[in-house]
Image (cartoon, grey):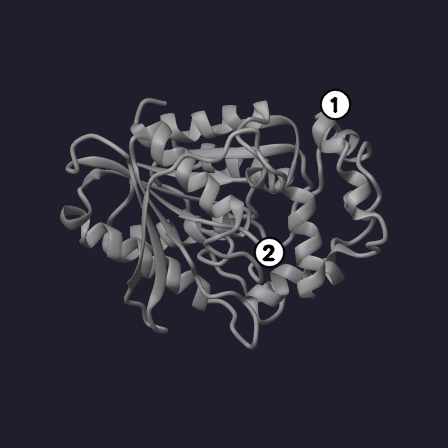
């Protein structure tokens, strides 16, 4: 069953005939963000926040560092986090970035570094956002002492497009540097250039959605993926679409899917591929919610439970 607080917001999308077109305009993106987000009963936690930059091959990569409010400033766990937005939207201020960082910072007592990778707009495409994500991770890893981070307790993750980017980055660092984080967190992300067909249970769930939110019958609209790749789907490699990679030897992975999300099929298939490769993988389905739920308040019960799960994982206790 779709969470009633979420279903009550469906009328906010009335008049939008195409999510693809909405994502392609500032006005459309603003409506999508307004639909996905609402004011919490309690404001997100207040923590120390500062902006910094990581050097990267395409220029400096902005990052935002969130510090736990108390305790020793050494040997702390860390989450490096990347927001979503279809590879062409989103920023450090969006709730999926800022609220998630604040909540995990406090719940896990962890330093959270949020990455403002370049978006796939104005001629930018893969591998630029991927390279930015790799560069930000390396900056955190190489400055762990300055940041007061335990290098053995660095977790890396993201939501939606950010899940894709961080998974690809971890694969690159495994292959290039022989280095892996404590855990990879893959939250309602896309791992395939062509999303696998939904299972019967997922098809039944998607049938409950309003038409504007339900995947269309027939071939999937791959605009966002093609735009990110800057070329045909066949151009994708394993760093651009992690399901294409050799997955053996990857760090433990937490896959979090939304129950009412067409991309759940990608997360489920990615989980199966990780398991076949012998990776320690855990999959959790967040019931009642749709794609993008980390833009919603932590006091929405399933969101709060998911944040607790992320925090427990980052602390190394999951």
Q: Residue at x 85, y 53 (%)?
A: 15
Q: Residue at x 33, y 69 (%)?
A: 60
Left or right: 174, with 246 as reference point: left
| Label 1 residue SS | loop
For the residue pair 32 and 195, the one nearer the viewer reads as: 32
- If the image is split into quadrants, where does the N terminus sit? top right
Q: Can residue 271 be seen at all in this image of the molecule?
A: yes
The percent position of residue 96, horizontal first and vertical second, equals 52, 44
User: Mark number for residue 1?
Assistant: 1
| Total marks placed | 2
The percent position of residue 188, horizontal first and vertical second, equals 56, 40
Tell me which corner region of the image, top left, top right, bottom left or bottom right, holds residue 250. Answer: top left
Q: Residue at x 60, y 37 (%)?
A: 39
For the residue pair 186 and 303, the one nearer the viewer reads as: 303
- If the image is split into quadrants, where does the C terminus sit? top left
Q: Residues within 10 Å of mark 1 (few under 14, many from 20)?
A: few
Q: Earlier in the sequence, mark 2 or mark 1?
A: 1
Q: Which residue is mark 2?
A: 86
Q: Can residue 159 be seen at all in this image of the molecule?
A: no
The percent position of residue 67, horizontal first and vertical second, equals 28, 41
Task: Report the Cα–Cα distance between label 2 and label 1.
Answer: 26 Å
């Amino acid at each position: 069953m779709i969470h009633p607080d979420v279903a009550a917001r469906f009328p906010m999308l009335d008049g939008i005939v195409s999510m693809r077109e909405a994502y392609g305009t500032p006005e459309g993106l603003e409506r999508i963000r307004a639909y996905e987000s609402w004011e919490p009963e309690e404001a997100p936690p207040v923590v120390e926040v500062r902006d910094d930059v990581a050097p990267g091959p395409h220029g400096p990569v902005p990052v935002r560092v969130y510090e736990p409010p108390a305790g020793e400033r050494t040997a702390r766990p860390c989450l490096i986090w990347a927001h979503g937005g279809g590879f062409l939207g989103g920023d450090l201020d969006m709730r999926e970035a800022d609220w998630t960082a604040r909540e995990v910072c406090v719940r896990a007592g962890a330093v959270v570094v949020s990455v403002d990778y370049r978006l796939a707009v104005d001629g930018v495409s893969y591998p630029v956002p991927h390279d930015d994500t790799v560069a930000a991770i390396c900056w955190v890893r190489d400055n762990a002492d300055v940041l007061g981070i335990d290098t053995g307790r660095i977790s890396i993750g993201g939501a939606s497009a950010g899940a894709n980017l961080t998974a690809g980055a971890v694969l690159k660092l495994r292959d290039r540097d022989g280095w892996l984080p404590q855990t990879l967190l893959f939250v309602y992300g896309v791992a395939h250039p062509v999303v696998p067909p939904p299972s019967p249970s997922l098809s039944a769930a998607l049938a409950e959605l309003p038409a504007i939110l339900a995947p269309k019958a027939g071939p999937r609209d791959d605009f966002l993926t093609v735009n990110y790749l800057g070329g045909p789907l066949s151009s994708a490699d394993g760093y651009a679409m992690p399901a294409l990679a050799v997955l053996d030897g990857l760090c433990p992975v937490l896959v979090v899917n939304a129950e009412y999300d067409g991309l759940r099929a990608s997360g489920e298939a990615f989980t199966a591929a990780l398991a076949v490769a012998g990776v320690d993988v855990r999959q959790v389905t967040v019931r009642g919610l749709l794609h993008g739920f980390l833009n919603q308040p932590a006091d929405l019960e399933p969101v709060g439970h998911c944040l607790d799960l992320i925090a427990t994982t980052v602390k190394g206790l999951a």
